Amino acid sequence: MFAVALGIAAGTILRRTLPALAVTLGVFVFLRLVIGQDLRSHYLTAVTVIYRFGHAWRHPTGSYWLIAQGLIGPGGHALNTPASFSGAAVNGVPIAEIPATCRALAFQPNLKLTSCLASRGYHGFISYQPASRYWAFQGIETGIFVLLAAALIAVTAIVVLRRDA
């Protein structure tokens, strides 16, 4: 419905078929990408689970959409994880982020470093959207596109009514 309203509005404003098709395709693809990549993850607050670093924890049951995961330092700030950090890392922690008291254990068996970091207040976290929110997300996105389509139809009606015959 949104794409049709966009095409009608573009055709009404531009009065040329091919430019209207190009504008419709470009705006539609751009808007779908922006909504899909940037806005969708913010429709509802993600569920965040914090767990003790180095301890086994259970992944969320069922399907879910992973938003973020990583490590939280003792001050409560998220650490640069290897995915966003180009330097060396041990056990998922960048060497620069390892406290001096634990750095000597960095190249020994992982259990010692993990125990040292856990005792210093390091935690893991995962933020996700559970699959049970699928229909809520569909409803929110449908509402966005219906409102945009209604606005485009209103713009088209105004342009047609104000245009000289």
Image (cartoon, rainbow, N blue to C red):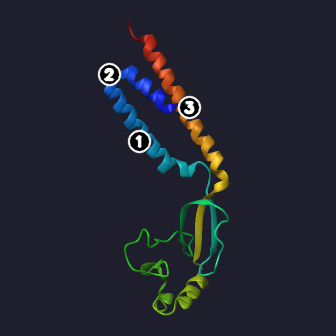
Nearer the observer, 9 or 111: 9
- Residue 145 at what x, y percent from top left? 54, 35
Which secondary structure lies at badge 1?
A: helix
**Residue under circle 3?**
147
Residue found at x 63% / y 41%: 139
Discs 1, 3 touching: Cβ within 8 Å: no
Answer with mark 1 or mark 2, whichever residue precedes in sequence. Answer: 2
- Residue 151 at what x, y percent from top left? 51, 26
Residue found at x 65% / y 66%: 60
Residue 30: image tag: 1
Calculate the distance from the C-alpha at mark 1 to the C-alpha at mark 3.
Answer: 17 Å
Report the side of 82 relative to 55 (left or right).
left
Residue type marked 3: Leu
Answer with mark 1 or mark 3, whichever residue precedes in sequence. Answer: 1
Answer with mark 2 or mark 3, whichever residue precedes in sequence. Answer: 2
Residue type marked 1: Phe
Residue found at x 50% / y 23%: 153
Calculate the distance from the C-alpha at mark 1 to the C-alpha at mark 2.
Answer: 21 Å
Q: Answer above or below: position of 87 versus 4.
A: below
Q: Mark 1 Cα within 10 Å, few/some/many (few <14, many 20+)?
A: few
Residue type marked 2: Arg
**Residue under circle 2?**
16
